[in-house]
Image (cartoon, grey):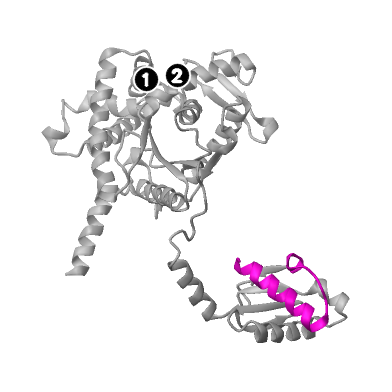
Amino acid sequence: MELISQIRWAASQALQQEYQYALSAEEVLVNETKPEFEGDYTVVLFSFVKQLKKKPEDLGNELGRALLAANPDLFSAYNVIKGFLNLTIADSYWRQFLKASYDNPDFGRRSRRGQKVMVEYSSPNTNKPLHLGHLRNNFLGWSIAEIYKASGYDIVKTCIANDRGIHICKSMIAWQRYAGGATPESTGIKGDHLVGDYYVRFNDEYRKEVAGLMADGMEKDQAEKEAPIMKDAQQMLIDWEAGKPEVIQLWKKMNSWVYAGFDETYRRIGSDFDKTYYESNTYILGKELVDQGLQKGVFEKEADGSVWIDLTADGLDRKIVQRRDGTAVYITQDIGLAVKKYEEFHCDQSIYVVGDEQNYHFKVLKLICQKLELPAADDIFHLSYGMVELPSGRMKAREGTVVDADDILDEMIDEAARKTK
């Protein structure tokens, strides 16, 4: 019998014996004691006061004494605060509880046969190395998956590699322009770090070009659009989606450097995945679903060719799902991935471990999946958590202001060695 059920039963028995007041255990209201008061569980007395014609304090003291006398292995103390009887659970109860639980190999394992849960975590971009935020995400996601597994669920750990998009093209353009053919082997730099260096380099050069255009009299907004390096990155994204051979070859080469770097870091922290998905595959399915959504009237196409969904009736706003040039956005691939996950694993719940800056994104994702009537749309769950920030503010990879995962691991190992010695 669960502890609260035991307290209810004991209280109903005491009321019967002391006052000949018969009621079922379910009619006794028991709550956890508020932290500002002494005790573990509280019996609410107000529903008995009128029938028994007792003052709340008198009733509480009489009932408390009766409960302690009849249940010395369950209660060790009590106090009364107005109409609330606060009870302290005896140490002997907890000792017996722990012994019984320790001897029971199935303690905490409810029967979850046939119930499958997918936990997605890590999900890095392939234009930069893992950082402190990724470490936190991995530890949270891996732990949630293991807790579910220990509770008897069938668990699938997944990761989505965000391996396409404008941010990837930025690293590629910068490497083409400034690397001179540098590779991880030729430089001795870990692959994900090398690619990340060129993502930072892109941002540095972009700011210089924008500043130069503004110095020539162009407005800032226009300069940001007209900067040659940004236009080259945007064109590269179009060429990538069109399958231009030389672009695809460069993309595969640089991504292979990053994956090798990621794998090394994952091994160091003990993070693992049953399945890794790639945005470069799922975005295509997402674009097909956008076409289906247009036919169903879920999405609407603007005059410039971009595709949107209007969620104002749901308390949100309008959200773009496909750019005017036909290229996909993040939400596009996430719609496709939601379907692919279900088709492959038929999970009862799909948990996304992602920071709280994406709260809005996942509200939109779930709504779109529901409106498209996709399977398991109702079982999408965003496990949100607060972001890691530096004293100077949010970490920004493009500005090089991140706490690198490999650096912090090295530092922690050095610190552990120093303290051990």
Residue that label 1 marks: 237
Is 236 situated left or right of 145 in this image? Answer: left
Q: Nearer the viewer, residue 5 or 246?
A: 5
Q: Nearer the viewer, residue 421 or 129?
A: 421
Q: Residues within 10 Å of mark 2 (few under 14, many from 20)?
A: some
Is 169 situated left or right of 420 in this image? Answer: right
Q: Assess whether mark 1 and mark 2 are in contact (beta carbons under 8 angstroms).
A: yes
In the current view of this chain or complex, which residue is farthest to the left?
186
Q: Which amino acid does the dot numbered 2 rest on? A: Thr
Seen at 23% across and 23% down, the residue is: 176
Residue that label 2 marks: 327
Residue 81 place in picture, x, y as percent: 72, 80
Query: Which of the two discs, 2 and 1, labels the residue nearer the N terminus?
Result: 1
Q: Quadrant of residue 377?
A: top right
Is 159 situated left or right of 263 in this image? Answer: right
Quadrant holding the C terminus: bottom left
Residue 17 place in picture, x, y as percent: 77, 81
Q: Which residues are magenta?
A: 1-28
Judge whether residue 29 is colored magenta.
Answer: no
How many marks the image carries: the answer is 2
Q: Residues within 10 Å of mark 1 (few under 14, many from 20)?
A: many
Q: Which amino acid does the dot numbered 1 rest on? A: Leu
Let me know if residue 25 appears in the view.
yes
Q: Quadrant of residue 15?
A: bottom right
Q: What secondary structure do most residues of the magenta stretch adopt?
A: helix
Q: Secondary structure at mark 2?
A: loop
Let me know if residue 301 appears in the view.
no
For residue 22, above or below residue 306: below
Is 255 situated left or right of 47 in this image? Answer: left
